[in-house]
Amino acid sequence: MPTDKLIELDGLTKYFYKPMGLLGRKKQVIQSVDHVSFHILRHETFGLVGESGCGKTTIGRTITRLYEPTEGKILYDGTDISHLKGQELLPFRKRIQMIFQDPYASLDSRMTVMDIIREALDLHGDLHTKEERNQRVYELLDRVGLQREHANRYPHEFSGGQRQRIGIARALAVDPEFIVCDEPISALDVSIQAQVVNMLEDLQKEFGLTYLFIAHDLSMVRHISNRIGVMYLGKLVEVGDSEEIYQHHLHPYTEALLSSVPVPDPETARQSQPIMLEGDIPSPIAPPSGCRFRTRCPYATELCAQQEPPLVNVNDHHAVACHRATPQA
Ligand SMILES: Nc1ncnc2c1ncn2[C@@H]1O[C@H](COP(=O)(O)OP(=O)(O)O)[C@@H](O)[C@H]1O
Ligand code: SF4
Ligand SMILES: [Mg+2]
């Protein structure tokens, strides 16, 4: 396994400010991502999971610098890219790409497939003639299982799975090394989800890619992730090697996420004590004090309301933020 860190997030924080009242002078603070730290090793797949609204997309968009962080650092291959702009950011825009959750919304409906995929090639300018760039688009279409004659068509002429292939070809066009895959299969028919995942895995091997793979469901990331991070309401609550998270998870929220996944083996199903998640996620505008999960946690105590549990290493491959799991911390 690789050991060097391609990406390191250090206290990454992204707040949005929503104007309130008639004049909009007061602002509500939406704490979408709050002091999150983890790293992604070169060539690995890091799975990021948690219920809808917990901040996964915001992390992905901040790492790719579609958003500027409010606080904290994004170290990319040793360089802090968190506040780079313009020409300084341009080389990283080429190295870091994103595949979006909704293949219907993420492709410009007025552009042909050729123009969509060639856009980044035109911008980054490694291929000097238009013919070379067109040729590259044809090769990319071949690689993602589309046909060359698709190049002159528009996004609405394709199925969801085909559109996601166009999105993947667009991400690959500039030969990136890191791709944020933001729930790339959630909007697709179950019958084609596996095809897209298999293709992403093949591409990873072929091009030595590193992935941040976002999903709301742990079962989706288990087999493709080397390591997994679990988020709740803007916080990272548990992180570790994939099997460690499945076999020896310590956070009640991770337990709850796993309980909601049907277990195929009846023996295992009988042994596990399901925790059901009750109630909705609180708002990131007014998150609970202390541990943000306490309003839904069956083990919550007074301490959980008073003190935020720090993320504590339980071994070299596993860290958790829960007073119950690491009482001495
Ligand atoms: N551009 C934005 N402006 C204001 N609030 C946002 C924006 N993007 C996300 N949010 C809020 O931040 C929180 C996290 O959203 P998101 O990152 O999309 O979560 P996830 O991808 O895990 O579903 C949500 O409460 C969402 O409403
Ligand atoms: S810190 Fe307390 S409320 Fe939070 S997950 Fe652990 S036991 Fe539950
Ligand atoms: Mg999302």
Image (cartoon, grey):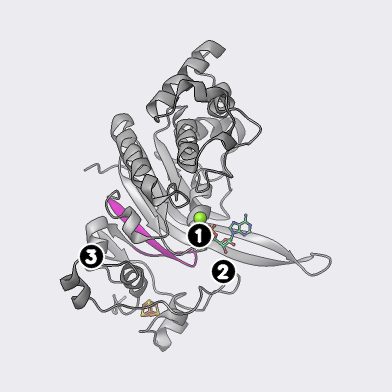
**Residue name at image x 53 percent, y 11 percent:** 131
Mark 3 residue element: loop
Identify residue for label 3: 264
Residue 81, image x, y percentages:
50, 42
Q: Is residue 122 magenta?
A: no
Identify residue for label 1: 55
Residue 299 in which image quadrant: bottom left
Mark 3 and mark 2 residues within 8 Å of each other at the beta carbon: no
Beta carbon of the mark 2 residue lies under 8 A of ligand 1: yes
**Residue name at image x 49 percent, y 13 percent:** 132
How many C-alpha atoms fall within 10 Å of the one at disc 2: few (<14), some, or many (≥20)?
Answer: many
Identify residue for label 2: 284
Main SS category, magenta section? strand
**Residue name at image x 50 percent, y 30 percent:** 91
Beta carbon of the mark 1 residue lies under 8 A of ligand 1: yes
Which circle's residue, 3 or 2, is located before the other in the chain?
3
Q: Name the amino acid, label 3.
A: Pro
Q: Nearer the viewer, residue 176 or 173?
A: 173
Residue 311, image x, y percentages:
36, 67
